[in-house]
Amino acid sequence: MESIRITPGFCPNCGSILPYLRTTGNVKCYTCLHDWPPEVFGDMKSNFTINFNTYVKAKIAKKEDEDEGPIVERLCPKCGNEKMSYATLQLRSADEGQTVFYTCTNCKFKETENS
């Protein structure tokens, strides 16, 4: 007799991906319409980790490496300093430009520009 290989999350009958298991009851395969008990998922466990880029400033002396990003030549409207750091984010829809956040390296004044 042939041994059938059962893969957790897949229908043992036709091999299709089974729909998400609710908290109770059986799961029905969309392809072959066979009902399966929750055990067909085995001991599948999912762990999700979301990592964000973090920037921790050292509260020591004022240094250039404390700036919030790359530095460009841009005039600060508040103090007249000619250097500002910047960071970009896509805040609007994908077919529009990104938003650039500028921070003065001297007085920490912040301004934005939609590019």
Image (tube, grey):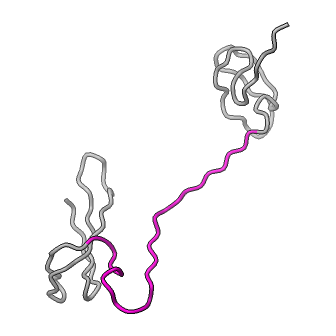
Q: From what the image shows, is residue 112 above or below residue 27?
A: below
- Residue at the (67%, 18%) spot, across then down: 15
Q: From what the image shows, is residue 25 above or below residue 113?
A: above
Give the percent coordinates (x, y) of residue 66: 36, 81
Q: Is residue 32 left or right of residue 23?
A: left
Give the percent coordinates (x, y) of residue 55: 44, 73
Task: Please identify the quarter of the rendering in which residue 50 is found.
Answer: bottom right
In magenta segment, residue 32? no
Q: Which stretch appears magenta?
A: 44-70
Which residue is farthest right? 1
Task: Please identify the quarter of the rendering in which residue 20 is found.
Answer: top right
In magenta segment, residue 64? yes
Q: Is residue 62 left or right of residue 71?
A: right
Q: Is residue 42 left or right of residue 90?
A: right
Screen quadrant of the N terminus: top right
Screen quadrant of the C terminus: bottom left
* 38 or 50: nearer the viewer: 50
Task: Please identify the quarter of the rendering in which residue 82 is found.
Answer: bottom left
- Residue at the (27%, 77%) spot, across then down: 103
* 38 or 62: nearer the viewer: 62
- Residue at the (47%, 69%) spot, across then down: 54
Q: From what the image shows, is residue 3 above or below residue 50?
A: above
Give the percent coordinates (x, y) of residue 33: 70, 16
Count how many numbered circles sit on residues in the image. Answer: 0
Which residue is farthest top? 1
SS assignment for the magenta stretch, majority: loop
- Residue at the (26%, 75%) spot, across then down: 85
Give the percent coordinates (x, y) of residue 105: 26, 83
Q: Is residue 46 left or right of residue 61?
A: right
